[in-house]
Image (spheres, rainbow, N blue to C red):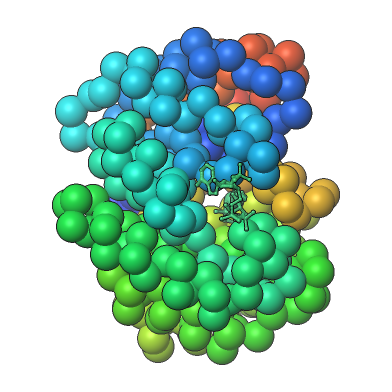
Amino acid sequence: MQKSNYPKQATIYEVGPRDGLQNESGLISIDDKVELINQLSTTGLKHIEAGSFVSPKWVPQMANSNQVLDKINRAQGIRYSALAPNLIGLDAAVDAGVDEVAIFGAASEGFSKKNINCSIDESIERFKPVVDKALAHNLKVRGYVSCVIACPYDGAIEPEKVADVSQRLFDLGCYEISLGDTIGVGTPNKIREMLNAVSKKVSSDALAIHCHDTYGQAIANIVAALECSVRTIDSSVAGLGGCPYAQGASGNVATEDVLYLLNGLGIQTGVDLEKVASAGDFISKALGRDNQSKVAKALSK
Ligand code: HMG
Ligand code: MG
């Protein structure tokens, strides 16, 4: 029998409170956001993206991230992170006491312009002082690259372009690069091709995969990423989410679905599936919608 190259362990990077909620049109109460993060904090997760310090004109839903971070019960051993696209955002994130920040660029010019209002080159220039200041505050910095397979404005993206932007963010001082299939159009062959190119520039130890599940390919794509030695998987409880600047993109892959997959493959995460499903049920009810996780639905029957 052929030996599988799955790892013994993998890390789940929970992005639900940020990526999951940022696209909601109705304002979600601070108490509901806090309750969600508090429930997630009891599941064994070690990374929770708790908010976003972006312009409130661009993403109104995240405007109260400082109050959310102020009210949560911080559990030991969990890194609570937030997005910070510029120095204004970084200063606000530092004031809110985050453990880690994330900068976010793109492999496509069209998305960069629509999402952060600048070209890729300009974004790298803008990120430099953000990373320097964050590191000076002893904060780890994560780098996102969006549109690693395709862009809603520019179409298909060359793997070499993704590799180039990933390397530029890594060279700035990011400890990890999260590769976003922002509109969820990837298939395993495309994911492999992209990861082959990126891992020539940034070691796969420092890569994460960030799949939106628009076309239902996220779980297959995550298997492909695991086979390419990626060990960190971004996911969102209850499959919440979408990007406000990528129209039609659905939520992230559900954390519950990823946990079911990893449990089945014998890959340890230290995260309790039932507890995550319970947090997912809470937020789905609070938002008045069905839980998007197939696994959570099956478990609730
Ligand atoms: P801009 O308009 O070019 O910025 O936006 P600016 O520097 O000219 O500032 C304009 C105004 O915004 C000023 O206020 C600033 O003070 C204010 P005014 O003088 O007009 O009253 N401002 C801020 N306020 C609060 N916090 C800040 C901040 N910065 C400026 N940090 C900017 C540039 C980057 C700010 C804007 O484009 C922005 O906020 N974009 C964020 C968009 C976003 O959050 N998208 C979703 C997250 S990315 C994502 O979901 C993808 C990901 O999940 C991976 C994947 O799936 O691919 C990560
Ligand atoms: Mg995303």
Q: Residue at the spot x=58%, y=14% of the render?
A: 29
Instruction: Tell me: residue 5, above or below residue 156.
Output: above
Q: Residue at the spot x=58%, y=43% of the render?
A: 55
Q: Position of residue 197 (x, y in %)?
A: 50, 86
Q: Position of residue 200 (x, y in %)?
A: 40, 88
Total residue callouts: 0
**Quarter holding the N terminus?**
bottom left
Instruction: Tell me: residue 22, above or below residue 244.
Output: above
Q: Position of residue 150 (x, y in %)?
A: 72, 71
Instruction: Tell me: residue 29, above or below residue 53.
Output: above
Q: Nearer the viewer, residue 49 or 213?
A: 49
The reply to whether residue 226 is visible in this rendering is no
State which quadrant residue 67 falls in.
top left
**Quarter holding the C terminus?**
top right
The reply to whether residue 132 is visible in this rendering is yes
Q: Residue at the spot x=49%, y=85% of the render?
A: 164
Extreme residue toward the front, this view: 88
Judged left or right of residue 201, residue 224 is right
